[in-house]
C-alpha cells in the first residue's frame, strides 16, 4: 500500500512539473534554436543527476554495470529521449500545436499496448474506457484552440506518431530491464546531449543565451528533464501495472493550460472545462478501480 502511494507521488509530481514545459519551451524556442536548447538542457540534466548520485554514494553504483549495460542504457536514451524529442519538435514545425499535441499524447496509450505485448499486462475494458476518456479530453482541449501551420501535414503527423511510439516503447523497455533509474537517466540524457550537439553545430546557427534564458534552460534541464522524467520512470518501474500511471499523463495538457493562464493571463475556454471533465473522469475511473482492489 505504501509502495503504491509512492508511485502516485512520483507520477503526480512529474505531471505537475511537466505542466510548465509548454509555456517555457515556447518562450525559449523563439530565441534559441531547437537542438541547441535540447543540448544545453539535457547536458544540465545529466550533470545534475550525476552530481546527485556522486553525493549520494560516491559513484559506487556505477560499478554494478558493465559496458553492455551502459550500451543498452545509451540505446534506450537514444530511442526514448533523443528520437522522441527530435521527432516531436519536427512535428510541431509542420503541424499546428493543437494537432501535434493530440498525436503526441498517443504515448500513454502506447505504454499500455507495449506493456500488454512485452510485459504481459492485461488491458481490461475499464482501462480501455479510462484511456479513451482521457484522450478524448486532450482532443477537446486542443481542438478548442485556433491555429494553422504551413507545413507537410502528413510528414508532421507521421513524426508525432513515431515520437509517441518511441517514448511509449522506451518507458516499457526501461521498466522491463529494472535498471537503477538515476543511472538510467544520467545515461539517457547524456546520450541525448551527445547526439544533439553535432546536429546543432551542423544544422543550426549557435545563439548565446541571455541570463534569463539560462535560467529557463536550467529549469528545463534540472526540474523538467532530470527530476520530472526520473520520477516518472520510477513511478512506472514500481507500479503494479503501467496503465494506471500512464493515464495520469493526460492531466499534463490541462495543467499546462492552467499554468499559461496564471503566468500569461490567458483565459480558460469552455473547451478547457469540457476537457477537465473528460480527463478527470478517466483518471478517477482508474483510481476507483485501484482503490477497490487495494481495499
Image: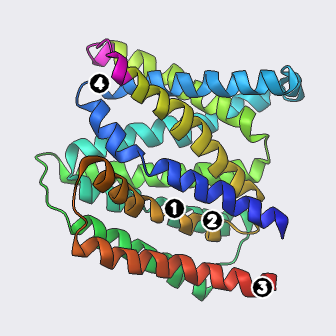
N-term-proximal mark, 4 vs 1: 4
Secondary structure at badge 2 equals helix
Whether residue 190 is in magenta: the answer is: no
**Residue 157, image x, y percentages:** 29, 54
| The quarter of the displayed image where residue 38 is located | top left
* 181 w.r.t. 130: above or below: above
**Residue 68, image x, y percentages:** 78, 29
Does residue 44 appear anywhere in the picture? Answer: yes
Q: CA distance from mark 4 to mark 1?
A: 27 Å
Q: Which residue is disc 4 drawn over?
A: 33
**Residue 151, image x, y percentages:** 15, 45
**Residue 105, image x, y percentages:** 42, 60
Sort mark 1 into few (<14), some (14-19) or many (20+) by Cα contacts within 10 Å: many
Sort mark 2 into few (<14), some (14-19) or many (20+) by Cα contacts within 10 Å: many
> Which residue is painted at 32% across and 11% down in the image?
208
* 71 w.r.t. 168: above or below: above
Q: Is residue 51 left or right of residue 153?
A: right
N-term-proximal mark, 1 vs 3: 1
Q: CA distance from mark 1 to mark 2?
A: 7 Å
Q: Which residue is disc 3 drawn over?
A: 293
Q: CA distance from mark 3 to mark 2?
A: 16 Å
> Which residue is painted at 59% across and 68% down in the image?
112
Q: CA distance from mark 2 to mark 4?
A: 33 Å
Whether residue 206 is in magenta: the answer is: yes
Sort mark 4 into few (<14), some (14-19) or many (20+) by Cα contacts within 10 Å: some
Q: Which residue is disc 1 drawn over?
A: 249
In front: 257, or 245? Answer: 257
Residue 245, disc: 2
Instruction: State the extent of the magenta-drawn residues as a range.
Output: 202-213
Amino acid at each position: 500500500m505504501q509502495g503504491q502511494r509512492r508511485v502516485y507521488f512520483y507520477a503526480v509530481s512529474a505531471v505537475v512539473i511537466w505542466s510548465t514545459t509548454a509555456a517555457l519551451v515556447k518562450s525559449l524556442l523563439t530565441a534559441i534554436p531547437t537542438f541547441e536548447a535540447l543540448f544545453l538542457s539535457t547536458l544540465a540534466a545529466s550533470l545534475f543527476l550525476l552530481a546527485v548520485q556522486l553525493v549520494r554514494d560516491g559513484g559506487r553504483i556505477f560499478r554494478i554495470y558493465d559496458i553492455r549495460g551502459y550500451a543498452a542504457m545509451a540505446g534506450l536514451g537514444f530511442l526514448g529521449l533523443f528520437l522522441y524529442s527530435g521527432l516531436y519538435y519536427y512535428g510541431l514545425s509542420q503541424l499546428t500545436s493543437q494537432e501535434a499535441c493530440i498525436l503526441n499524447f498517443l504515448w500513454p496509450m502506447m505504454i499500455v499496448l507495449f506493456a500488454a505485448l512485452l510485459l504481459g499486462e492485461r488491458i481490461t475494458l475499464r482501462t480501455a474506457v479510462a484511456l479513451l476518456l482521457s484522450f478524448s479530453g486532450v482532443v477537446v482541449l486542443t481542438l478548442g484552440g485556433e491555429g494553422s501551420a504551413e507545413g507537410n501535414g502528413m510528414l508532421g503527423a507521421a513524426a508525432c506518431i513515431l515520437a509517441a511510439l518511441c517514448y511509449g516503447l522506451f518507458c516499457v523497455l526501461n521498466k522491463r530491464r529494472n535498471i537503477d533509474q538515476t543511472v538510467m537517466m544520467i545515461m539517457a540524457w547524456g546520450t541525448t546531449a551527445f547526439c544533439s550537439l553535432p546536429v546543432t553545430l551542423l544544422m543550426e546557427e549557435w545563439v548565446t543565451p541571455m541570463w534569463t534564458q539560462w535560467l529557463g534552460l536550467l529549469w528545463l534541464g534540472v526540474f523538467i528533464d532530470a527530476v520530472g522524467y526520473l520520477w516518472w520512470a520510477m513511478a512506472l518501474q514500481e507500479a503494479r501495472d503501467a496503465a494506471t500511471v500512464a493515464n495520469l499523463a493526460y492531466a499534463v495538457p490541462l495543467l499546462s493550460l492552467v499554468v499559461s493562464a496564471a503566468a500569461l493571463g490567458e483565459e480558460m475556454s469552455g473547451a478547457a472545462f469540457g476537457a477537465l471533465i473528460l480527463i478527470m473522469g478517466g483518471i478517477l475511473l482508474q483510481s476507483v478501480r485501484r482503490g477497490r482492489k487495494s481495499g
